[in-house]
Image: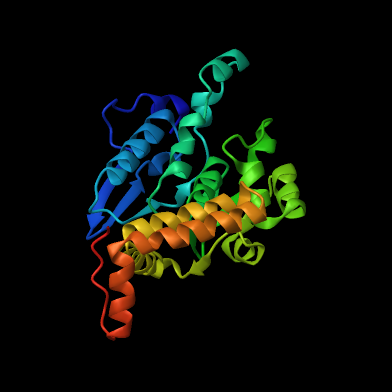
């Protein structure tokens, strides 16, 4: 299949499938013929799904995965090849990809195969990364004359340290899930045939905790890299204290003392 074949696909084609499993939304990238390459249309459909999840109080957690051999094997090169600097600067090209990193609800990446370039960056925008034992990660942009543009140099360095991030970005080397685990890039490596089962078990667990408390925890953890430690500790303490205004906090502690499951109302 050529780049032209990919570009001529139907305009209304579904590149992202949305499924629901109780309080979990499952977002699946469905462009296997291009290894789920991240084109503008796919990103637009992904962002629409994220908007839907955030506007639906019934959704407590989100899982993002891909079909076929890839989670996402990078940006769609055929879509970018002829762009000029003026065009990408004027349109702030790739900025819409950041929508995933701003999602207020917990997002788990279930990386089933290749997560390269933009696909690796997309996984790093998620809160938890579970990787199949056959998954591969990398930032190969240098091999095609460019560099990571969706947070690859920044998030990768925060996760694995300067030396490892520098090597991966400067060489374009692809690493296994097992090496990514040792580096601290992924949360856990799971056997491929159990990836979605175990990912959904965790997603359901998170989704059934108090939604406002989960949101506060996510915000507090994310703020670690953005504010000094003293300010972060102070912010965390204030957020902890604010949970005492929640019905869910009282119910959770009461249920613990009564030795019964908590019945959270998400308020």
Using the rendered view, name the quadrant where residue 258 is placed: bottom left
* Residue 207 seen in the current view: yes
Residue found at x 34% / y 69%: 201
Out of 203 and 71, give the one closest to the viewer: 203
Q: Is residue 209 left or right of residue 224?
A: left
Using the rendered view, name the quadrant where residue 256 is placed: bottom left
Residue 81: image location, x then y, percent: 56, 23
Residue 125: image location, x then y, percent: 51, 47
Out of 104 and 28, give the one closest to the viewer: 104
123, above or below 245, in the image:
above
Residue 59: image location, x then y, percent: 27, 53
Which image quadrant: the C terminus?
Answer: bottom left
Residue 149: image location, x then y, percent: 60, 34
Residue found at x 40% / y 25%: 7
Residue found at x 62% / y 50%: 225
Residue found at x 56% / y 61%: 186
264, above or below 231, in the image:
below
Out of 166 and 203, give the one closest to the viewer: 203
Which image quadrant: the N terminus?
Answer: top left
Out of 200 and 32, give the one closest to the viewer: 200
Using the rendered view, name the quadrant where residue 117 is placed: top right
* Residue 111 seen in the current view: no
Q: Is residue 75 left or right of residue 163?
A: left
**Furthest residue to the right?**
163
């Amino acid at each position: 299949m050529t780049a032209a074949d990919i570009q001529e696909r139907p305009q209304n084609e579904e590149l992202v499938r949305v499924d629901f499993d109780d309080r979990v939304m499952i977002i699946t990238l469905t462009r296997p013929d291009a290894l789920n390459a991240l084109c503008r249309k796919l990103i637009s459909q992904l962002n629409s799904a994220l908007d839907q999840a955030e506007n639906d109080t019934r959704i407590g957690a989100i899982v993002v995965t891909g079909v076929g051999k890839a989670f996402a094997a990078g940006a769609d090169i055929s879509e970018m090849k002829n762009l000029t600097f003026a065009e990408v600067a004027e349109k702030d090209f790739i900025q819409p990809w950041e929508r995933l990193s701003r999602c207020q609800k917990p997002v788990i990446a279930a990386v089933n195969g290749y997560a390269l370039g933009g696909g690796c960056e997309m996984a790093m925008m998620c809160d938890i990364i579970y990787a199949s034992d056959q998954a591969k990660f990398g930032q190969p942009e240098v091999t095609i004359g460019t560099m990571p543009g969706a947070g690859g140099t920044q998030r990768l360095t925060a996760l694995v340290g300067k030396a490892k991030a520098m090597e991966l970005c400067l060489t374009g080397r692809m690493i296994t899930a097992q090496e990514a685990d040792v580096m601290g890039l992924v949360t856990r490596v799971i056997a491929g045939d159990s990836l979605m089962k175990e990912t959904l078990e965790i997603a359901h667990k998170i989704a059934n905790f108090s939604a406002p408390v989960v949101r506060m925890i996510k915000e507090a953890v994310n703020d670690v890299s953005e504010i000094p430690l003293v300010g972060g500790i102070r912010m965390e303490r204030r957020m902890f204290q604010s949970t005492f205004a929640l019905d869910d906090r009282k119910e959770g502690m009461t249920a613990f003392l009564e030795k019964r499951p908590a019945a959270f109302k998400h308020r």
